[in-house]
């Protein structure tokens, strides 16, 4: 279970960094994001997303479940944050406070500029921004990583 959890966590990090920095249009639209926006997104989120892997390695090295529980808890927080950021505006019309931190834009404006021209498979709900396929894949990876990390922690 350790290898699967570690692999999923690191796969989510690699996918996140790749889709944040590399133009994979129409999956993403990194050309619409400023260099500053991309740099901030990666420098803030990638270390946080990598920490569960470090904690799992510590748990394995120390033969104790405590760091693994911390890894699972952090991974759950990461997935909840991502889901709140993308799915609350779509399903409930509610934008989380950190959605556009430092951009000077609303979530609808940021979404229209950076995500609206990517692959989106969800139906419209009024004029609400919809999660794009790029983020739906990321959320699936994060949810799988959180689940398997929790199972690993419980198995120690």
Image: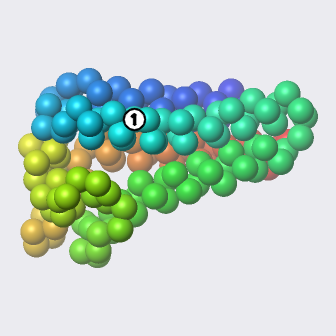
Picture quarter with the N terminus: top right
Of residues 84 and 3, the one drawn nearer to the viewer in this rendering: 84
Residue drawn at point x = 53 percent, y = 36 percent: 47
Q: Residue sitting at 46 percent across and 42 percent down?
A: 45
Where is residue 64 shown, x and y percent of the image? 89, 40
Task: Describe the element under mark 1 as helix, strand or loop.
Answer: helix
Q: Mark 1 points at which residue?
A: 42
Relative image position of residue 135 (x, y in whole percent) = 32, 45
Of residues 145 and 66, the one drawn nearer to the viewer in this rendering: 66
Number of callouts: 1
How packed mark 1 is, by other alpha carbons closer than 10 Å (few <14, some 14-19, many 20 or more), is some
Q: Can residue 12 be seen in this view?
A: no
Does residue 44 appear left or right of residue 99 in this picture? Answer: right
Q: In this view, does 70 lie to the left or right of 10?
A: right
Query: For the point 17% across and 54% down, which residue is it?
Result: 110
Q: Is residue 113 above or below residue 130?
A: above
x and y percentages locating residue 131 in the rendered image: 25, 54
Residue sitting at x 26%, y 24%: 22
Where residue 48 sits, quadrant-wise, is: top right
Which of 66 and 33 lies nearest the eye of the viewer? 33
Q: In this view, does 82 lie above or below 8?
A: below
Quarter of the image that includes the C terminus: top right
């Amino acid at each position: 279970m350790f290898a699967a959890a570690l692999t999923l966590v690191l796969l989510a990090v690699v996918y996140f960094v790749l889709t944040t920095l590399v133009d994979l249009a129409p999956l993403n639209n990194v050309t619409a994001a400023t260099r500053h926006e991309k740099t901030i997104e990666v420098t803030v989120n990638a270390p946080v997303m990598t920490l569960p892997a470090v904690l799992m390695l510590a748990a394995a090295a120390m033969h104790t479940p405590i760091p693994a529980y911390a890894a699972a808890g952090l991974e759950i927080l990461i997935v909840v944050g991502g889901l709140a950021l993308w799915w609350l505006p779509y399903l409930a019309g509610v934008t989380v406070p950190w959605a556009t931190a430092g951009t000077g834009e609303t979530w609808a404006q940021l979404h229209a500029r950076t995500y609206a021209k990517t692959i989106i498979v969800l139906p419209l709900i009024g004029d609400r921004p919809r999660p794009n396929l790029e983020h739906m894949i990321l959320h699936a990876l994060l949810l799988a990583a959180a689940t398997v990390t929790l199972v690993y922690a419980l198995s120690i």
